[in-house]
């Protein structure tokens, strides 16, 4: 079973990733134009786009906690997070700092992103994967304060 605390942590990771993607996108649009080569801008924009896609995916997986297999769900989110760090992180390093030596991390990160999507599919379709629970969250139980 997915705990409320675990879901809050992953939701925070997803929302934080989306926040940083918006901030990076704004930075790229306003501070980088004309300062770095077009090739670097394209790499930077790709990093931002994939970071946002996968931050939203993590948020969506969090919202689906009641019917996804917990182990596959966790593996999916961990893989997506590692994928974003490696894929987008390496593209940020290449485009902003010119660190071409980290380019080998980009396809590894892409592999983790693909793996994360496969785990998400497995979380939903594997035997026993769909389990709708109408059990209340811990904070919904009687006698417990809502924000405790």
Image: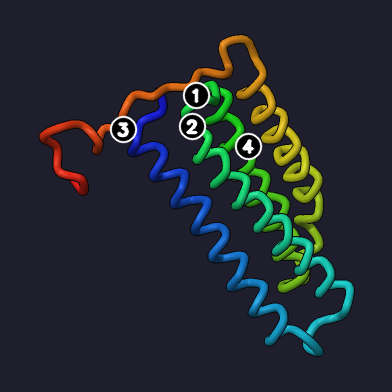
The residue pinned by badge 2 equals 65
The residue pinned by badge 1 equals 70
Identify the element where label 1 is drawn: helix
Identify the element where label 3 is drawn: loop
The residue pinned by badge 4 equals 79
Disc 2 to disc 1, how far (Cα)?
7 Å
**Residue at the spot 78% in from the left edge and 50% down from the top edge:** 106
Image-based side of 143 in relation to 98, left or right: left
| Coordinates of residue 22 in the picture (x, y in percent) | 61, 69
Q: Are marks 2 and 3 in contact (CB under 8 Å)?
A: no
Q: Is residue 92 positioned above or below 38 on the image?
A: above
The front one of 106 and 23 is 23
The front one of 74 and 126 is 126
Q: Are marks 2 and 4 in contact (CB under 8 Å)?
A: no
- Eye-nearest disc, 2 or 4: 2
Quarter assignment of residue 133: top left
* Residue that sits furthest to the left in the current view: 143
Disc 1 to disc 3, how far (Cα)?
15 Å
Q: Is residue 38 positioned above or below 127 on the image?
A: below
Q: Are marks 1 and 3 in contact (CB under 8 Å)?
A: no
Neighbour tally class for label 3: few under 14, some 14-19, many 20 plus, Cα within 10 Å:
few
Disc 4 to disc 1, how far (Cα)?
14 Å
Disc 2 to disc 3, how far (Cα)?
11 Å
The residue pinned by badge 3 equals 137
């Amino acid at each position: 079973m997915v705990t409320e605390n675990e879901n809050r942590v992953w939701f925070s990771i997803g929302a934080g990733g989306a926040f940083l993607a918006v901030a990076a996108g704004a930075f790229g649009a306003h501070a980088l134009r004309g300062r770095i080569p077009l090739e670097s801008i394209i790499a930077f924009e790709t990093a931002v786009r994939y970071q946002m896609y996968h931050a939203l995916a993590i948020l969506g997986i969090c919202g689906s906690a009641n019917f996804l297999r917990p182990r596959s769900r966790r593996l999916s989110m961990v893989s997506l997070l590692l994928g974003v760090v490696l894929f987008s992180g390496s593209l940020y390093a290449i485009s902003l700092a010119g660190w071409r030596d980290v380019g080998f991390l980009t396809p590894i990160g892409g592999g983790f992103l693909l793996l994360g999507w496969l785990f998400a599919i497995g979380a939903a379709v594997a035997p026993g994967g769909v389990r709708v629970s109408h059990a209340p969250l811990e904070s919904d139980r009687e006698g417990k304060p809502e924000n405790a």
